[in-house]
Amino acid sequence: MVVKDRILETALRMFRVYGVKGVTMFDIARDCGISKKTVYEHYVDKQALIDEGMQLLLRNHTAFLQECNALADNAIDELVRASQYIVGLARTLNPVMLFEIQKYHPDIWNNIEKFKGDCILTGIKENLKRGMTEGLYRQNLQTDIVARMRQLQLEAAFDPIQYPADQFDKQQVMEQVTAHFILGIATLKGHKLANQYLQIKEED
């Protein structure tokens, strides 16, 4: 791995664990085993590292959702896979990082908000259309309304105010919210398929 990529990977990992405000360029250099001067040779300041780190995170998220869409057997399978990915991501991401980006780095936060609309919301709409075509979701769904409802569900599931970490397990919250969503939009055929996925997950 080239030095620049190693610096970025290290910085992103530290941001996700400790937040962005408390991590210094010296911390990143020390964790990489290089000098601070070397870090500055590749990144002009911490703002540049945060910006590129968030871009990498969003690109990886987009790539996974595209892969998920291609590999999933059906719309319900796709939705369940995506939910599991989000849980895994949330477990390695300190909510403080997003809070600090929103407060101290508004330009980067605007890119995240744009991503929510361009990628997440659009992806949910496409999943709804796929499920309706496959006969798994009800035909009378108003996708613009239901997609936004699902997006709000996802955001609420990881809101520490709504579901404090010391009282709720993120995976259980996501499983309950996702099951409720699927069963609420599914046809009888979709219900049967959804129950199969839920039973498989219980056995695991």
Image: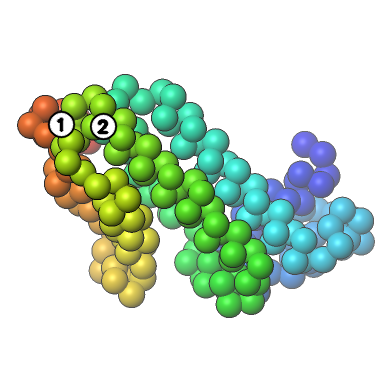
Q: Residue at x 76, y 44 (%)?
A: 5
Is 116 left, or right, of 111 in this rendering? Answer: left
Q: Which mark is residue 190?
A: 1
Q: In the image, residue 72 lies at what x, y percent?
A: 36, 25
Q: Please, what is the three-letter code of the amino acid marked with disc 1?
A: Gly
Residue at horizontal 28%, vertical 54%? 145
Q: Position of residue 109 (x, y in %)?
A: 59, 66
User: Measuring 74% from the left and 59% from the top, which residue is drawn there?
Assistant: 49
Judge whether residue 130 can be spotted in this image.
yes
* Marker disc for residue 131: 2
Asked whether the residues under the numbered discs 1 and 2 touch, taking CB atoms below 8 Å apart as contact, a structural biologist would say: yes
Would you place residue 104 above or below residue 159 in this image?
A: below
68 on left or right of 163: right
- The mark total stands at 2
Amino acid, disc 2:
Gly
Residue located 65% across and 51% down the image: 55
